Amino acid sequence: MTQQQPTTTEPMSQQMQDCIQACMACHGVCEETMSSCLQMGGQAQMQIMRALMDCSEMTRMCADMMMRRSPLANEMCMMCVQACDMCAEACMSMPDDERMTRCAESCRRCSEMCRAMAGATM
């Protein structure tokens, strides 16, 4: 028996819209932070860069999958939670840097939204 997937003509839930917006906002902040981080150099920044790149790609892909109602979107949301949590932790290794703090906050918000979305049916 196959599970029927929602069609793209069905209205998107507010929860899904909010999660997509949180993912895209986080993606943008990670991209901006990467640019700033590249100028710093050093081994610690390389670890932060890896976390930023993973989070940036994961949030964009997660938003894309939700928008097209992929049957894998729930699993992608859970992976996005992990990437966002890892990135927030990496950014908070530099708590005096305003851009890093802003990025960590965006990652945490996205993580919360994706965690809630993964628990919902799409």
Image (cartoon, rainbow, N blue to C red):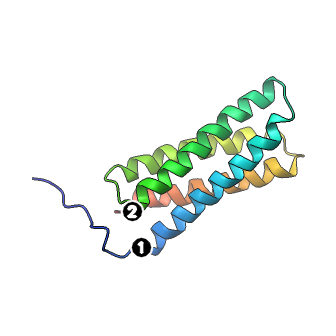
- Where residue 65 sits: x, y (%)? 42, 54
Mark earlier in primary sequence (1, 2): 1
Give the structural element (helix, strand or loop) at label 1: loop
Amino acid bearing label 1: Ser
Q: Residue at x 42, y 58 (%)?
A: 66
Give the structural element (helix, strand or loop) at label 2: loop
Q: Which mark is residue 120?
A: 2
Image position of 9 with respect to 117: above or below: below
- Where residue 1 sits: x, y (%)? 9, 53
Instruction: Report which quarter residue 69 is drawn in.
Output: bottom left
Tell me whether the residue at label 1 lies in contact with that at label 2, contact meaning CB atoms closer than 8 angstroms.
yes
Q: Which mark is residue 23?
A: none
Q: Which residue is mark 1?
A: 13
Q: Residue furthest left?
A: 1
Q: How many marks?
A: 2
Q: CA distance from mark 1 to mark 2?
A: 10 Å
